[in-house]
Image: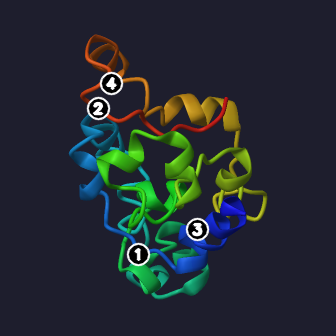
Amino acid sequence: MALPAAVLCSAVALGADFLGPESCKACHADAYAVWSTSKHARSLESLTREQQRDPRCIACHAPNLVEQKVGAVSCESCHGAGQYYVPAYVMKDPELARLVGLLDPGERSCRSCHDASSPSLRPFDFNAQLKAMDHWSAGRPRRAAAPSTEAAPARAPQ
């Protein structure tokens, strides 16, 4: 009976808040560094002023701007609101982290914006783009040397 209660208390059911990408930086410095130089980090800035007021553009370029005040495609845009999974003791338990809202994004979540109706009209090759935005393997050598000092990164399935 504990599992249904845990599912009902998931971050989605509780309406978890975003903490912002800086909240991820302390434990995931390498991933944050990769993200901060990415197009996702500057997604809102890539729009004109007119486009920044267009809900159709904001839906992908800053999907959490209105409700969470995050003006980019950030960690939590893909991995879910971090309010309940950000504590280190939760992140050290992958099952618990996922239970309280941590998401493992995959191709489907990327294609919610990178699809055939995108105004860029560029084909989206998920596998190539996944490699281009790899933000989880940079810290592997350091984690292997000291596995108990850093929480395991959330990463997209391959």
Q: Residue at x 32, y 20 (%)?
A: 147
Q: Which image quarter holds the N terminus?
A: bottom right
N-term-proximal mark, 2 vs 3: 3
Residue type highlighted by circle 3: Ser
Circle 2 is placed at which residue position? 150
Determine the secondary structure under disc 2: loop
Residue 72: which quarter of the image? bottom left
Its colouring scheme is rainbow
Q: Which image quarter holds the C terminus?
A: top right
Circle 1 is placed at which residue position? 17
Q: Is residue 91 above or below residue 21?
A: above
Circle 3 is placed at which residue position? 10
Q: Is residue 16 above or below residue 50?
A: above
Q: Nearer the viewer, mark 4 or mark 2?
A: 2
Determine the secondary structure under disc 3: loop
Residue type highlighted by circle 4: Gly
Q: How many marks?
A: 4
Circle 4 is placed at which residue position? 139
Residue type highlighted by circle 1: Asp
Most distant residue in the front direction: 1
Kindly report the distance in space between the C-alpha atoms of the residues bearing marks 2 and 3: 24 Å
The answer to whether 21 appears left or right of 65 in the picture is left
Kindly report the distance in space between the C-alpha atoms of the residues bearing marks 1 and 3: 12 Å
